[in-house]
Amino acid sequence: MPISGTYEWLVGTRYLRSGHRRGFLSFITGISIAGLALGVAVLLVVMSVMNGFEKELRARILNVSPHATLSGLTEKLPEWRTAQQRALAMPGVIAAVPYIESQGMLAAGQRLAGTDLHSIDPVREKGTSGLESVMIAGRLADLAAGSWRIVLGDVLAAKLGVKVGDAVVAIVPEGTVTPTGIEPRRRRFTVAGVLRSGMYDVDSTLALVHVADAARLLRFGDAMSGVRLQLADPLAAPHVVYELAVRLGGGFNVSDWTRRHANFFRSIQMTKSMLFVILSMIVAIAAFNIVATLVMVVKEKEGDIAILRTLGAGPGNILRMFGVQGACIGLAGVAAGIGAGTLLSINLEALVHGLEHLTGFHFLDAKVYFMSDLPAEVQLHDILKVALVALLLCLLATVYPAWRAARVLPAEALRHD
């Protein structure tokens, strides 16, 4: 009489349970499930941390960086108004703001620090960038034309030892001819605010002044360095700024946030791929436990297998019985791992902060990791990818034990019974 699929399922799941206390998972099966769940959870948490890191890094970059810039081939762009009007006429462009930028030095007493001097117009910036949201002292609106005020990154302010209301001297590379020779141009500014983007390299160099003050300091006259674009979809920045340059007839330098910070995101993707491959080995090791578990079950149940064979079960039926057993272990381990990994990822930032509070040790140094928090974001495609890889490894792990069970000869197995 042929053995039905339901019977194969019942026998396969029955072998998961202990022979002494029916209804409880055997110890060795529980260890296999726990090992697989641990591997899946670790893999999912690491993938979620990389996702969160990338998302947080992107958000912080877009808070302090323009989506795209169009500048002249030299340091000045005289016809910036034409570029601004053409940009505003393009679909998807929220704002097109002229800007001036230069590198220089800031001095406060005996302290010096290099800086990236950027100009903004607070009126035009309102609602088009995230700069106001990262201010921790003062207001962006205090940068009025002719006020000679400046907003510094918090790390830069700490280097100079200044706070709101203190004075700093800006030194730019453009020289002024004097009877004693050429001297760098300098100007005294009052600190009007401090911002914190959460990115060390930005907070340690960024200085903001009003665009009119920057034009006077650098003697740009009516020219600008270029036009900054704010887009409805930041991911469309490369296409939009390139199309704008083509419409203007070429002869411009174009850039966007994906190019300026390409190394960051490229390194994140590379690290994510490498970690996925490396940590998949943990899941593979857990799958080896399934092999050991099923081999032990086959050895223990040789008599039962022989009896089933004498009752009409073929090698294919036996193969499917142990395949069911391995699949159940795999499904239970993957489901438990995904549940634990998702729960841990959602609460990871709070857990890290709790550990930092208990130990007094700060795990993430912003000087090294560009941020001081450990965000995590669980994505559906990562869950599916982790689950698929884990289940495939589990199914592969059942091949040898099931094949061995199918080769049990009834006469030899029952010889000593």
Image: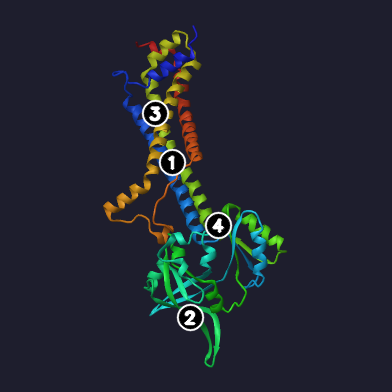
Closer to the observer: label 3 or label 1? 1
Task: Write down the residue under mark 4.
Answer: 262
- In the orientation shown, which residue stands out farthest toward the right? 249
Contact check, label 1 and label 4, Cβ < 8 Å:
no
Q: Is residue 378 above or below residue 411?
A: below
Left or right position of 249 against 289: right
Work out whether 186 lies above or below 307: below
- Find out whether the residues at labels 3 and 1 contact each other: C-beta distance under 8 Å: no
Give the crowd class for mark 4: few <14, some 14-19, many >=20 residues within 10 Å: few
Q: CA distance from mark 3 to mark 2?
A: 75 Å
Q: In this figure, which residue is indicated by the disc labeled 3?
A: 292
Residue 118 pos. (x, y %)? 52, 69
158 or 261: nearer the eye?
A: 158
**Amino acid, disc 1:** Leu
Disc assigned to residue 44: 1
Gap between marks 2 and 4, in whole Å? 34 Å
- What amino acid type should be assigned to the residue bearing mark 2? Arg
Disc 2 to disc 4: CB gap under 8 Å = no
The answer to whether residue 37 is visible is yes
Q: Amino acid at mark 4?
A: Ala
Question: Sequence order check: which comes first, mark 1 or mark 4?
Answer: 1
In front: mark 2 or mark 4? 2
Work out whether residue 375 or residue 408 is closer to the camera in this orientation and state it.
375
Label 2 sits on a secondary structure element that is: strand
Point out the tag, 3 or 4, that comes first from the N-terminus.
4
Residue 333 percent across, percent down from the top left = 40, 31
Judging depth in this view, the residue of 95 and 280 nearest the camera is 95
Residue highlighted by disc 2: 187
